[in-house]
Amino acid sequence: MDELLTQLRAAAEPTRLRLLALCARGAWCVSDLVAILGQSQPRLSRHLKLLVEAGLLLRTPEGANAWFQVPTEADLARQILARLPEDDPLLAADRRAAARLAAERARVASDSFRRHGADWDEIRALGLPGAEIEAALLGALPARVGRLLDIGCGTGGLLERLASRIEEGVGVDASRDMLALARTRLAERGLSHIAVRQADMYRLPLADASFDAVTLQMVLHYAEDPAAALAEAGRVLKPGGVLLIVDLAPHQRADLLGAHAHRWPGFDDAEIAGWLGATGCAAARSETIPGALPVRLWVAERKTRPVSVLTF
């Protein structure tokens, strides 16, 4: 009863209700919320602290900043928000201000991408069969997934396409610019059950065995240490969970190592199977997706006991 009363008291204040309504639609940092609500940072920080302590908001640190979002499991918060009138003038004004800020944030991020040469899609740039890759990946996932982690999520494209099949999604990436675009994409589409955060794929700030599925799409060939990246992916995967890897098969395009900063000229099945076995995952199957460069999809499952390394 004490926890319920704490949550009710935390929500029972006009500004905190406005904060909950905004953070249920996407992730915002304090400076964003100051701009949207027109209130001082100390005042809003106090309100946010109370909401976080009550479990109604999730605070995710990112560098010198922190992002706030209503967590998927905050049922009481969503029940309260469901009773708020959509046509309330104050809440409608907040939504309009949030939309303007999100659009500006996306523009700034896109400008930064263009200045730094990162505004491109690798699958398109390399002439790879994007539709076929997506179809193969979607076909390898169960029809319904509980919690899914996308490592190297970029601008959130894969998470958006998986949104209807997952109960909760988390994306991690090292690029703040990409995450800014991902947050805008997810907020515009109302995908409040998906969140993204900045993280190092070698040291994921996530609990052991906390995801039902993990995806890495076109990530490993940039990794300094693919084995370590897969070890982290395996660590956060639940027993029985599925790990999906989409990446280049071995190729002779040496120019990609220089022009596109690839660290590895593709991977063969034996390499991937060996690394997966070391993580406690069993390689289940793989398939080739033909294109300008050979692409492979590897599917593995997390086991509850040590497994022998499989060969394809």
Image: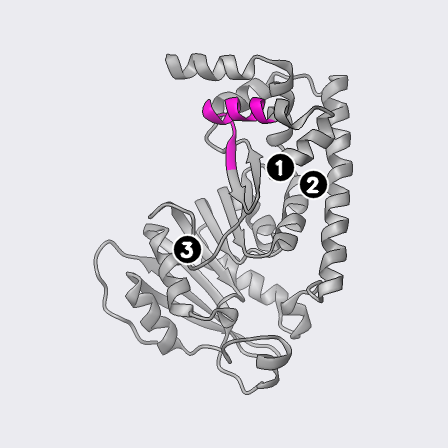
The answer to which image quadrant residue 309 occupies is bottom left
Residue 63: x percent and y percent?
A: 55, 47
Callout 2 touching callout 1 (CB < 8 Å): no
State the separation of the CA atoms marked 2 and 1: 17 Å
The tag on residue 188 is 2
Instruction: Give the magenta-colored segment's residue range.
Output: 45-59
Q: Position of residue 306 (x, y in %)?
A: 21, 61
Q: Amino acid at mark 3?
A: Arg
- Image check: 48 left or right of 106? left
> Could you say where residue 48 lies in the image, as x and y percent from the top left?
56, 26
Residue found 53% across the figure and 58% down from its top: 152
Residue 127: where, in percent of width, then height?
Answer: 66, 74
Q: Which mark is residue 131?
A: none
- Disc number at residue 203? 3
Is tag 1's residue or tag 3's residue first in the polypeptide sequence? 1
Residue type for callout 2: Glu
Rendered-image quadrant of the N terminus: top left
Which secondary structure, mark 2?
helix
* 180 in magenta: no
